[in-house]
Amino acid sequence: MAYDLYVITDEMIGKGRSHTRLAEMALLGGADVIQLRDKNMDSASLFWTATEIRALTGDAGACFIMNDRLDLALAAGADGVHLGQQDMPVGEARRIVPRDFIIGCSVGSVEEAVHAEISGADYLALSPVFATTSKDDAGDGHGLRTLGAIRAATRLPLVAIGGITRENIGSVIGAGADGAAVISAVVGEEDVTSAARAMKRLIAEAKSPG
Ligand code: TZP
Ligand code: MG
């Protein structure tokens, strides 16, 4: 399972394009994972949007992760759910999902990372690695030192979220992240497909320098 380029859809940042359209464009650029994230949409709309993105990601051979909503993730046939520290506890989610269902967890410290791993998370997201304006309550960036410390403390796949750009993505991979989760650097661009392709190339270069 590749987490290299993990694109989070956001209609507030997406220049008038729908979640589904953003996902479609990001997949054409090589996104490995699409996360549907919307804090305002009603549950019915979110469900139908999830079914559309499920179909698109399936066709592309990519992974589909639903943010926050385990119920909708299961109902729409998503590959997994992404849970934050304020969402349903990872261990409780683990008890009620199929064996191969992916649970991702946002963490901000080595302690939270180790706890998430013990609880049954499948991947971790250091959130936020850098400061960002894309999430209201993101807080200060935890930085590359914390990223490296979490890399050393757990064996789970580790992605970084928050403030990742073409300029700093190499440093994020260099510090030990398996992948980069982005909103604005891809869905906030006029040409989402080209932006995704560029990020994907930079990740590949950082993983095999020279
Ligand atoms: N979780 C932590 S930071 C963040 C989320 C969803 C927003 C990331 O957006 P951007 O534009 O890539 O900084
Ligand atoms: Mg959440």
Image: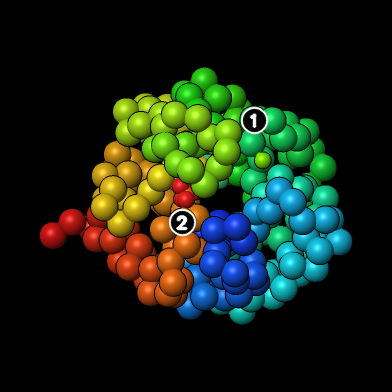
Front residue of this view, candidates 8 and 120:
8
When the figure is inspected, residue 158 is found, relative to residue 208, above or below; the finding is above
Q: Count numbered badges in the picture.
A: 2
Image point (50%, 36%), residue name: 127
Given the image, on which type of amino acid does mark 1 rest? Gln
Task: Measuring from the top left, give residue 122's x and y in whole percent.
Answer: 59, 43
191 to the left or right of 74: left
171 to the left or right of 22: left
Tell me the crowding category of disc 2: few under 14, some 14 to 19, or many 20 or more residues within 10 angstroms, Cα based.
many
Disc 1 residue: CB within 8 Å of ligand 2? no
Task: Measuring from the top left, give residue 113's x and y in whole percent.
Answer: 52, 29
Q: CA distance from mark 2 to mark 1?
A: 23 Å
Tell me the mark number nearer the camera, choosing from 2 and 1: 2
Front residue of this view, candidates 35 and 191:
191
When the figure is inspected, residue 113 is found, relative to residue 95, above or below; the finding is above
Disc 2 residue: CB within 8 Å of ligand 1? yes
Front residue of this view, candidates 147 and 192:
192
- In the picture of the structure, the residue carrying the numbered disc 2 is 184
Task: Measuring from the top left, give residue 170's x and y in whole percent.
Answer: 26, 50
126 to the left or right of 199: right
Numbered disc 2: secondary structure: helix
Image point (72%, 73%), residue name: 52
Q: Outermost residue, top direction?
A: 111
Numbered disc 1: secondary structure: loop
Whether residue 23 is visible: no
Q: Outermost residue, right direction?
A: 44
Given the image, on which type of amino acid does mark 2 rest? Ser
Q: Quadrant of residue 200?
A: bottom left
- In the picture of the structure, the residue carrying the numbered disc 1 is 85
Look at the image and tell me in which quarter the C terminus lies.
bottom left
Instruction: Answer with mark 2 or mark 1, whichever residue precedes in sequence.
Output: 1
Image point (59%, 24%), residue name: 115
